[in-house]
Amino acid sequence: MLEVQVIASGSDGNCTVIQLDDEAIMIDAGLSYSKTHKLLEREGVDESAIKALLVTHEHADHVNGVGPIARKLGIPVYCNPATLGSFNPGSVDFNIIQTLQRFKVGNFDVLPLPTLHDAADPCAFTVSAGGKNILVATDTGRFTFPLRQALEDADFAIVEANYDNRMLHEGPYPEPLKRRIAGDHGHMCNADSAREIKNTALKPDRTIFLGHLSKHNNTPDIARDTVAEYTGIKRYKIDCLEFLGDTRTVTVSR
Ligand SMILES: [Zn+2]
Ligand SMILES: [Zn+2]
């Protein structure tokens, strides 16, 4: 069975687990070990199944828990050299990866994809396992060509829908921060996300999960409404985490 556990998604922390039978990998670890442990337990993930921790970029909401979690679980951290040079998780084992160079972890075939984001060398991951493709693509100002290809091939995709345009622009953030978020190296808005989803040929049973929703500039309802309206995908088929501390398990194949 191939499952994805969305443990956290957003500026308070990001963590996704992809599990094929009794083997799993974790993408990003933005929460503390104890919080992550609790949420994994709630979703029924056996920690000892997790074989590796992959890091997309060095922002705190993606790496805060990397050191403690890698040490507790006794697993190696996979990231590119620039990311490795930009945060300090303490003593952990590293495996250096390069964007657009495929690597294997157990039964998972992983391809890091370039994102556009204000970090040292940020990436997204597409993971192939059990004949399915899973894309985790957040923290990008817009989609790069390889991301589009991966979205087209994905059976399950977490796609960033960070903010609603109007909420951001009418909201409380200072102008420079608004510009950073809306810039090409910031985050994707609901409409950007909708456009990318619509423009990639739909696998009929592809599952879309919206990720990294801002708690100040977006709501789950607005994000789902925007994407459903624009893409024609039925609203109930578009999922996202509903509140801080919410988690989800999605079965990709049985
Ligand atoms: Zn982030
Ligand atoms: Zn970021």
Image (spheres, rainbow, N blue to C red):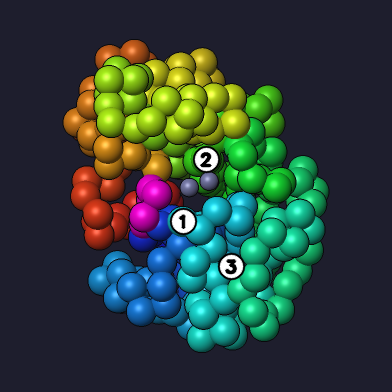
Q: Which mark is residue 61?
A: 1
Q: Is the CB of the residue bearing disc 1 within 8 angstroms of ligand 1?
A: yes
Residue appearing at x 66%, y 75% in the figure:
76
Residue beneath label 3, please? 53
Is 162 positioned to the left or the right of 140 in the image? left
Residue appearing at x 39%, y 18% in the figure:
191
Residue 122 x %, y %:
65, 45
Residue beneath label 2, please? 139
Q: Using the image, determine if residue 204 lies above or below residue 55.
A: above
Residue range of the region highlighted in magenta in the rendering: 8-12
Amino acid at the residue labelled 2: Asp
Q: Is the CB of the residue bearing disc 2 within 8 angstroms of ligand 2?
A: yes
- Which label's residue is closer to the chain start, 2 or 1? 1
Residue 114 x %, y %:
69, 38
Is 100 positioned to the left or the right of 177 in the image? right
- Which label's residue is closer to the chain start, 3 or 2? 3
